[in-house]
Image: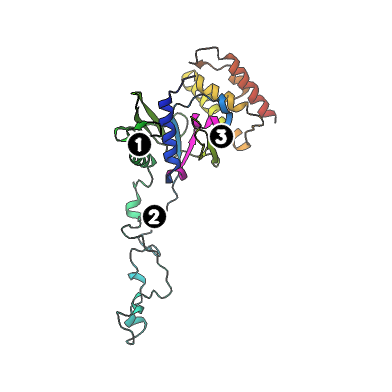
Amino acid sequence: MDGTTPGQRAALDHVLAVVDGSWLAGVLVLRGSVTMPAWVGDRARPPGDIDWMVRPMEFVSRDDLDPYPYVSKVDPVRHWPEVAHGVRCEIWESEDLDTGGHRPRVPPEGLRWISDTDADGYELSRPHNALLEQLTSRPETGDGVRLHPDKAERDGSWGYTEYAEGSGVRIHIPWQSRSGESGSVQVDFAYDERLPEPPVLTAVPRAAGQRPLGLWTASRELSLAWKLHWLHADQAATGSSAAKDLYDAVQLAEIQGIRLPCSLRRTLTVTPDDILTWTIAGGGGDAGPLLVRLAEAVRSMSAR
């Protein structure tokens, strides 16, 4: 399996820490190789990149024809004193602010409500941009690795289109250490992709004895279901699957007591016999034993 240099791992862990310390932790769900140590410990291969799913933002635009209570000012529901209370009240008295029991919701100063007319095409949440802004404020790790978010490369056409519907953004963030080592961290953001089951709060391990980070992640069961789906999809599309995905699937499938719920099992079409026929690319060795182990683990899960 591919290795990860100390500088690369430090940069990767720093990105996770920046997310953990910001509002992004509430809208991003982590999946992929970074989560594997939480499930299988030292058997996990070194993580190579960071893969986020973006939770959809709950949003209802204001109705332009009937905006109340989301009004820009209290004027529409104010009871002018000379009308509501008669001539005994002056317009500069406290009654001037009376709303007659109505409770309008005025936006915070300097902001405005988003209406129907400007909601179309409005980018409500683009965490990949927010992450780069956060890294601009916190570019350096504790051990001398500095990230350069201003030089990040964005690929807005990226996405897991071969596996699922939805758009995505891939960014490469350059980094450099004091010793002269350099590289880049790949961070993927999957937008509009459905999460088949709720995320779980996971203690995600980091290198060099640093404390784990509490982040929302895909569960180990969902991670396994995805791996099996991706392996099977690659076989159908290209005739081979990646050795790293096979390795991850074996580690997840052999977790003691793991069992896919019915909601995930019914989405899988792969059988143990199918697994034994797969062609595996890369890895530098015989994939046969791993295929046998995966087939046996899947067969065992099906019997539970």
**Label 1, residues with CA under 10 Å away: few <14, some 14-19, many ≥20:** some
Please state which of residues 214 and 226 is positioned toward the viewer in this rendering.
214
Task: Name the residue carrying label 1.
Answer: 139
- State the separation of the CA atoms marked 2 and 1: 36 Å
Q: CB of mark 3 within 8 Å of CB of mark 2?
A: no
Q: Amino acid at mark 1?
A: Pro
Position of 292 with respect to 116 (left or right) is right
Position of 35 with respect to 293 (left or right) is left
Q: Write down the quadrant of residue 102 in the picture.
A: bottom left
* 258 vs 121: above or below: above
Taking the spot 35% from the left edge, 57% from the top edge, the residue there is 113
**Residue furthest bottom in the image:** 88
Q: Earlier in the sequence, mark 2 or mark 1?
A: 2
Task: Name the residue carrying label 3.
Answer: 222
Q: Write down the quadrant of residue 15 in the picture.
A: top left
Q: Secondary structure at mark 3?
A: helix
The stretch of residues the image draws in magenta is 24-37
Quadrant location, the C terminus: top right
Please state which of residues 69 and 200 is positioned toward the viewer in this rendering.
200
- State the separation of the CA atoms marked 3 and 1: 33 Å
Q: Which of label 2 and label 1 is nearer to you?
A: 1
- Please give the label number shown on residue 191: none
Residue 226 image offset from top left, x and y in percent? 53, 31
Q: Earlier in the sequence, mark 3 or mark 2?
A: 2
Q: Write down the quadrant of residue 6 in the picture.
A: top left
Task: Name the residue carrying label 2.
Answer: 61
